[in-house]
Image: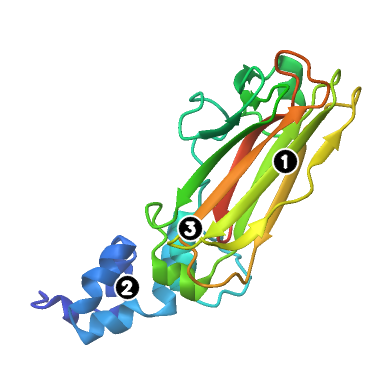
Amino acid sequence: MAVGNINELPESILLELFTHVPARQLLLRCRLVCSLWRDLIDLVTLWKRKCLREGFITEDWDQPVADWKIFYFLRSLHRNLLHNPCAEEGFEFWSLDVNGGDEWKVEDLSRDQRKEFPNDQVKKYFVTSYYTCLKSQVVDLKAEGYWEELMDTTRPDIEVKDWFAARPDCGSKYQLCVQLLSSAHAPLGTFQPDPVMIQQKSDARWREVSHTFSNYPPGVRYIWFQHGGVDTHYWAGWYGPRVTNSSITIGPPLP
């Protein structure tokens, strides 16, 4: 028998239809149509189905989730918020705050270095010189899709990672500072570990530094990331620490 009104369809079919509708349209448009649609769109079942359909969870997922709707949005937004982290576009998106010595430079990972680096997609790095070199990037969370209510009520974990290495023939100093900033750019959280001093004739292996911001105050609107360093022998050229594959991610990672 023909259906005269879409709401005459079984709820299971309506739920299946909603799994194919973009999430923002569900909330901004569909949820306002009627009380039936509102109640269906608010069901945990719908958002679990959407997570499964998008590959955000697996069939055997058994981890607790406080709010499946929020979980879906955090998963859909999850990516590296730093642009050009591996120097593929030169210094695009980066602010060269301090550019001492022979200044920042981009170099290619050698074949041997590629074998050693844990990510085979990384092919380049930024390298510092004999006076301090620092570069930074500011992440605008709203521009990246993280609206104010999501950040203030959920306050999802913010994970920061960076990779650095010295040259085997020269000592160097590596430094990193990351700040969570308010709309007025006032710091609401800071990660600034002690500078890493690497001695001459070190193993020159790549090292990862990471930090997770949790339970930070509401009002975070920007994230400021700055790293760099200097060689400690003041040799002309580019003998300071090398950096690449930096990242800022928010919320739970993909399975």
Looking at numbered disc 2 in the image, what kind of residue is underneath it? Leu
For the point 60% across and 20% down, which residue is it? 106
Looking at numbered disc 3 in the image, what kind of residue is underneath it? His
Looking at the rendered structure, which numbered label has been put on residue 62? none
Look at the picture and state if 142 lies above or below 81. Answer: below
Q: Earlier in the sequence, mark 3 or mark 2?
A: 2
The residue beneath circle 1 is 175
Q: Are marks 3 and 2 in contact (CB under 8 Å)?
A: no
State how far apart marks 2 and 1 are (Cα).
51 Å
The reply to whether residue 78 is in sight is yes
Viewed as shown, does residue 181 lie left or right of 101? left
Label 2 crowd bin: few (<14), some (14–19), many (20+), radius 10 Å: some
Query: Of the residues tagged 3 and 1, which is closer to the observer?
Result: 3
Q: Nearer the viewer, residue 127 or 232?
A: 232
Look at the picture and state if 81 lies above or below 152. Answer: above
Looking at numbered disc 1 in the image, what kind of residue is underneath it? Gln
The residue beneath circle 2 is 15
The residue beneath circle 3 is 185
Which residue is outermost to the top? Answer: 236
State how far apart marks 3 and 2 are (Cα).
43 Å
Viewed as shown, does residue 244 lie left or right of 150? right
Query: Of the residues tagged 2 and 1, which is closer to the observer?
Result: 1
Label 3 crowd bin: few (<14), some (14–19), many (20+), radius 10 Å: some
SS class of the residue under badge 1? strand
Q: Earlier in the sequence, mark 3 or mark 1?
A: 1
- Residue 13 in which image quadrant: bottom left
For the point 32% across and 76% down, which residue is it? 41
x and y percent of residue 146 in the render? Answer: 42, 60
Viewed as shown, does residue 172 lie left or right of 7? right
x and y percent of residue 34 in the render? Answer: 19, 83
For the point 39% across and 73% down, which residue is it? 46
